[in-house]
Image (cartoon, rainbow, N blue to C red):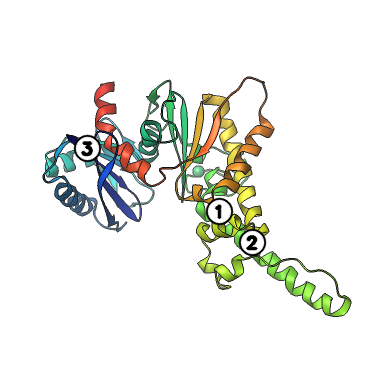
Amino acid sequence: MSFCLGADIGGTNIRIGLVDEEGRIVARRRLRTDPQAPPGTVLERLARTALAMAEKHEVASFGIGIAGLVDHRDGLVFTSPNLPAWERVPVKDILSRLTRLPVFCANDANVVALGEWLFGAARGSTDVLVITLGTGVGTGIIAEGRLLLGANHYAGELGHTVIFPNGVSCPCGNRGCLERYVGAEAIVHRCRRLLRLQQHRLASNRNQLTLFGGASEQQSLLFDLINYDYRRLTPKEIGIAARKGDRLALEVVEETGRLLGLGIYNAIMILDPEIIVLGGGISRLGRPLLRAVQKSVNSRLYGANRSFRIVLSKLVDDAGILGASRLGQIFSASD
Ligand SMILES: [Zn+2]
């Protein structure tokens, strides 16, 4: 049996998997990423780990997904937002030399989209939009059965489409990018603001209650989950509270879903996908997020015959490894 290696290089972790012909991950490793480390050192560690995993197996190719602008043909990483030391790194050349395997590289969102298309929620569809929600908002597009790269390999930058012309500034140089409203940082910021407001309201209600009596607003579960320390708040706690029906957490998730739905609606108008898959860590906000996105998209739709589905990823972290492992087949077939 032949195997393929797939790796997903992120800002905090590198996930590596050995994948069989059926798309099963038969072995996996995780390495911590030091964003400041020289790319050569990181790639040497990756190659060593991958070769150890591949020992005793026949390995056909090694696929790499990495956040940033990637020249898919030459396997060159121009820039990576999470890895500032990575500028014009010939990843394909370096890893081919170190592993003596055919190496293929792609943008991480494209790799996740391939994973969802070949093995996940979008299996069997020809027109797919996969959105990875995390620190940033990545997008991979399968159009008419092919991965869409675009003329400059920039296709699928939904996170940097503008939803508010005078909105908050974005590191990309624009204002009001979708990512600034639905990325992890924005969600936490939105939640902190609501928690502070509630804390304020509850304190002043208590003062008034002692004077007049009356019903008080229920305090959010989040205060206990973060032990009243706002710095401990992450999307994970917001998800836990939302699933327990916490009103404040649900308000945060609903607002996030409403804005994400606006971005997705715009993409639907351009691409007419059959299925939209929400993946990445933030998709763990789960059903409340999905419902809010669906509501937001449906409220804008016109025309009776547009049929599509919006679903949550079931693969989440594995989508990157699985998609990367198939880059060899995808790129060899398109040459
Ligand atoms: Zn931007």
Q: Is residue 69 left or right of residue 264?
A: left
- Residue 19: % across, % down: 25, 40
How many angstroms separate mark 2 from mark 1 (CA)? Answer: 11 Å
Horizontal arrangement in the rendering, residue 120 relative to residue 106 (left or right): right
CB atoms of marks 2 and 1 within 8 Å: no
Vertical position of residue 102 compared to residue 227: above or below:
above
Q: Is residue 257 above or below residue 250?
A: above
Residue at coordinates 29% horizontally, 32% vertically from top-left?
Answer: 72
Which labelled disc corresponds to residue 193? 2
The percent position of residue 118, horizontal first and vertical second, equals 36, 31
Q: Mark 2 or mark 1, which has the lower sequence index?
A: 1
- Residue 197 is situated, as x and y percent measured from the top left of the image, at 69, 65
Residue 4 numbered tag: 3
Kindly identify the amino acid type of the residue bearing the numbered disc 1.
Answer: Ala
From the viewer's side, name the closer residue of 238 and 259. 238
Q: Quadrant of the C terminus?
A: top left
| Helix, strand or loop at mark 3 | strand
Q: Amino acid at mark 2?
A: Arg
Picture residue at 75% right of the left edge, 68% below the top = 201
In the picture provided, is 81 more to the left or to the right than 207?
Answer: left
